[in-house]
């Protein structure tokens, strides 16, 4: 392959025709593949089927998990998630199957009423604002957009959000929080450095009730023998004198069953007491039977780690295949694309030449491969460079994933050549 940027117009045109012929051949195969969402594959879901055989419903303290009560969660489940999140059991609330639901509730609580450290509800500001490290998780951004927050883009670096930008923006009292996926971020797969975590915890903010929405969604989803590690945000905030700043979340959605797992949050005791008080009118208790099942099945952090090794054996070959095929299919064409190489999580990013991501996604879809909309990982769905494409390698079988990645490479090259020819 030749460097597309050193070619003249005729050479680019000839290369484009050759690739369009290859594209038509691939499209004629009738592909129907979905790489748009980070879903566990069926063989991953099968790993947890034995959990459904567990019939022991009485908790360790004698609580009948089938009945009402214990809004904060079963004691053993609080202790389990305390180990997961690095908190004390009394600093944990165990919820239903969705951590996103818990995050939505807390944004709504801040919007409607504020927090224990708030002077007023967030909706008293003409336009409250929220920081969105980008590219990031589209569903996070959608929550704050839904409540009318102005979404402020913060560039995402390999070390986490650009802290120089963050520290400048939090001088505005209307800025109420920041979204964070600190370990194996969605979609880049980056992990926050110790410096980034400490600066987030220690920075001075104009809003006394500024909140860090710390979504540790991939806290146990490692893909190597040398996993990334991050500092504990709750501990760092406590050490910096901002104990009420951190709201930490996790779930077992990609550990057991996405539609029937258990989620949890951890925060300061002041926050936990305040949140439980405000949850009280809404719900009597979450699904404690499911909480008990999960703890009986996974047992403890060692049991969780052993279970995740089974996931790794399924996922690691898929990530390796995608990275190898991207190297094979895109290297040698000049700097038409780059991609991240995550050490864990569920995603990686491909960055095309500027202005080529939407066209690449369109070409893939027309040939039968569904990708997440270009720009979805940015506030309001707008990538100012039109270059980021989120890749979710987890769901398709390996042979289908390889077909889809080869097609993706062809589409990136076609979109790049079309863009370069527009300029000549």
Image (cartoon, rainbow, N blue to C red):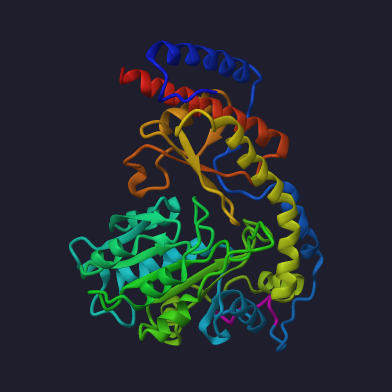
> Split into 4 quadrants, where in the image is the C terminus?
top left
Residue nearest the observer in this picture, 312 or 143: 312
Q: Main secondary structure of the magenta part?
A: loop
In the rendered image, residue 352, in percent from the top left (x then y), is placed at 44, 35
Residue at left offset 72%, top offset 56%: 311
Whether residue 408 can be seen here: no
Q: Is residue 415 above or below residue 380?
A: above
Q: Specify whether 318 is left or right of 116.
A: right
Quarter holding the N terminus? top right
Identify the residue at horizontal 40%, vertical 62% (top origin).
179
63 or 207: nearer the viewer: 207
The part of the chain drawn in magenta is 64-71
Image location of residue 137, percent across then percent down: 45, 53
The image quadrant that residue 386 belongs to is top left
Residue furthest bottom in the image: 61
Name the side, left or right, on which 17 lies relative to 27. Answer: left
| Left or right of 211, for residue 372 | right
Relative to 164, is 299 above or below? below
Q: Is residue 106 magenta?
A: no
Pick the front one: 328 or 58: 328
Residue at x 77%, y 57% (from the top left corner)? 47
- Left/right of residue 176 with respect to residue 340 in the rendered view: left
In the image, residue 354 lies at what x, y percent?
36, 34
Residue 307 seen from this side: yes
Question: In the displayed structure, would residue 88 be above or below residue 300?
Answer: below
In the image, residue 147 lies at what x, y percent? 32, 58
Q: Which of these two is toward me, 146 or 308?
A: 308
């Amino acid at each position: 392959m030749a460097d597309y940027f050193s070619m003249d117009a005729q050479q680019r045109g000839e290369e484009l025709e050759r690739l369009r012929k290859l594209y038509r051949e691939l499209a004629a195969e009738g592909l129907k593949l979905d790489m748009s969402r980070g879903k566990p594959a069926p063989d991953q879901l099968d790993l947890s089927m034995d959990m459904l055989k567990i019939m022991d419903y009485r908790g360790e303290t004698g609580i009948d998990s089938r009945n009402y009560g214990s809004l904060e969660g079963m004691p053993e489940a609080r202790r389990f998630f305390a180990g997961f999140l690095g908190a004390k059991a009394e600093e944990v609330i165990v919820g239903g199957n969705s951590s996103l639901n818990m995050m939505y509730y807390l944004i709504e609580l801040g919007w409607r009423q504020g927090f224990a450290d708030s002077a007023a509800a967030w909706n008293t500001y003409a336009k409250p604002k929220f920081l969105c490290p980008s590219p990031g998780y589209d569903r996070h951004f959608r929550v704050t957009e839904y409540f009318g927050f102005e979404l402020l883009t913060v560039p995402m670096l390999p070390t986490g959000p650009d802290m120089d930008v963050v520290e400048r923006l939090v001088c505005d009292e209307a800025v109420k929080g920041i979204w964070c996926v600190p370990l194996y971020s969605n979609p880049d797969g980056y992990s926050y450095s110790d410096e980034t975590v400490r600066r987030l915890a220690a920075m001075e903010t104009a809003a006394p009730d500024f909140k860090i929405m710390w979504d540790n969604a991939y806290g146990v989803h490692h893909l190597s023998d040398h996993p990334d590690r991050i500092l504990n945000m709750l501990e760092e905030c406590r050490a910096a004198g901002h104990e009420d700043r951190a709201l930490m979340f996790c779930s077992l959605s990609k550990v057991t069953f996405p539609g029937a797992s258990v989620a949890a949050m951890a925060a300061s005791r002041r926050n936990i007491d305040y949140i439980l008080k405000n949850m009280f009118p809404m719900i009597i208790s979450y699904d404690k039977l499911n909480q008990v099942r999960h703890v009986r099945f996974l047992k403890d952090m060692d049991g969780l780690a052993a279970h995740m090794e089974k996931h790794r054996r399924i996922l690691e070959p898929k990530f390796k295949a995608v990275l190898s095929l991207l190297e094979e299919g895109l290297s040698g064409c000049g700097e038409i694309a780059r991609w991240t190489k995550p050490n864990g999580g569920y995603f990686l990013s491909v960055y095309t030449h500027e202005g080529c991501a939407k066209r690449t996604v369109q070409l893939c879809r027309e040939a039968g491969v569904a990708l997440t909309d270009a720009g979805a990982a940015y506030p309001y769905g707008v990538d100012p460079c039109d270059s980021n494409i989120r890749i979710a390698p987890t769901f398709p079988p390996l042979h289908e994933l390889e077909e889809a990645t080869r097609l993706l490479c062809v589409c990136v090259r076609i979109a790049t050549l079309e863009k370069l020819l527009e300029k000549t």
